[in-house]
Image: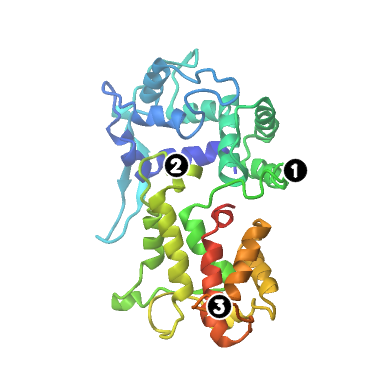
């Protein structure tokens, strides 16, 4: 579980060799794309996240590119529809001379660069910040947050660059269970789509792909919210947090809540998402207030203000003509009002957060 091993595997993967042009990186004509992104995106960032000092120079990029010259892959497939990619180094295209990287001079290979980069304190700090930003909460440039980075960077450095040890330390830390971490992240579209189905005990019928009638509705829902699964906009992936929140994306989130709650599954063989009345009935209480609180718990747990809770309660106690009515826990109410309640909760600002 060492970061060095993970990084080396990624660097030698056929997809990465193609995507960042390292297959065109040859002796005498080095291609700097992989050498640059290795440092900028995958390990350290342009500047140190704690000291704000530059992590590398343009000369480092050029020298690292030379270290990775000749990295190739071959396809050992025996049938047209099979792929068996094998990494190798074309020695005739590899620069086998001295390079100066981070002030050290030697005949560095690509494997040497992976080892050196993985051992840098800047890499440890960068990984900690990326993990926090993705799983816990966004870290700021405050002294307190920089101290957090240093604390967990020590775990990485003292565990032989173990990602397992680092993740365990973060996931069992006080920071992970703090009030700041509760709803500290904006849900990604995939989390909105899959999370709602799981929380409600809903179902997804993809259809029969054998008949060519498979449904890609879940993929399309996430894509319309801004996350085209398996097709990020660039090698940096998707922008997280507030990038998911805009007028277009929010409308798609609200529409998804509507589609999920209005699909009653009258045709079980029809591909798509659905939540049955029986599933909703399991969370519906005899009183409107308890029903609201139960669904806020199921879909969160969410803790909106008292005015929001009262508005949701009033919705359950109002008919289509705007008249006050008694809340009745029956199939007709569940089929209409409770489904509407779920849609409204999924449209709350609180639901958009993890």
- Asked whether 3 or 94 is in front, the reply is 3
- From the image, state whether disc 1 or disc 3 is nearer to you: 3
Image height of 317 relative to 88, above or below: below
Q: Quadrant of residue 130?
A: top right
Residue assigned mark 2: 239
| Element assignment for label 1 | loop
Image height of 345 relative to 278, above or below: above
Marker disc for residue 323? 3
**CB of mark 2 within 8 Å of CB of mark 1?**
no
Q: Quadrant of residue 28?
A: top left
Marker disc for residue 174? 1
What sort of colour scheme is used for the picture? rainbow
> What residue sits 66% from the left and 49% below the top?
182
Of the 4 image quadrants, the one containing the N terminus is top right
Image height of 95 relative to 350, above or below: above
Marker disc for residue 61? none
Q: Spatial distance from mark 2 to mark 1, Cα to Cα?
A: 27 Å
């Amino acid at each position: 579980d060492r970061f060095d091993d993970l990084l080396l595997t990624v660097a030698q993967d056929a997809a990465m060799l193609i995507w960042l042009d390292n297959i065109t990186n040859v002796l005498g004509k080095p291609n700097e794309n992989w050498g640059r992104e290795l440092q900028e995106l995958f390990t350290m960032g342009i500047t140190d996240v704690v000291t704000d000092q530059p992590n590398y120079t343009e000369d480092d990029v050029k020298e690292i590119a030379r270290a990775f010259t000749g990295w190739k892959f071959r396809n050992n497939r025996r049938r047209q529809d099979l792929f068996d990619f094998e990494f190798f180094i074309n020695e005739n295209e590899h620069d086998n001379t001295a390079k100066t990287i981070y002030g050290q001079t030697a005949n560095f290979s690509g494997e040497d660069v992976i080892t050196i980069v993985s051992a840098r304190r800047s890499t440890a700090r960068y990984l900690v910040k990326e993990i926090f930003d993705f799983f816990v909460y966004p870290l700021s440039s405050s002294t307190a947050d920089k101290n957090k980075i240093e604390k967990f960077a020590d775990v990485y450095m003292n565990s032989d660059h173990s990602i397992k040890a680092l993740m365990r330390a973060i996931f069992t830390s006080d920071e992970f269970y703090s009030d700041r971490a509760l709803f500290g992240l904006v849900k990604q579209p995939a989390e909105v789509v899959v999370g709602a189905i799981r929380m409600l005990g809903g179902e997804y019928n993809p259809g029969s792909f054998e008949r060519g009638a498979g449904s890609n509705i879940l993929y399309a829902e996430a894509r319309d919210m801004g996350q085209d699964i398996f097709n990020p906009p660039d090698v940096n992936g998707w922008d997280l947090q507030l990038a998911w929140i805009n007028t277009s994306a929010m409308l798609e989130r609200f529409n998804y809540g509507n589609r999920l709650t209005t699909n009653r599954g009258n045709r079980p063989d029809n591909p798509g998402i659905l939540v049955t009345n029986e599933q909703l009935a399991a969370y519906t209480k005899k009183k409107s207030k308890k029903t609201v609180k139960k669904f806020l718990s199921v879909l969160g747990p969410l803790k909106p203000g008292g005015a929001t809770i009262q508005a949701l309660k009033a919705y359950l106690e109002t008919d289509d003509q705007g008249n006050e009515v008694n809340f009745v826990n029956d199939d007709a109410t569940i089929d209409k009002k409770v489904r509407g309640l779920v849609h409204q909760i999924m449209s709350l600002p609180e639901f958009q957060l993890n």
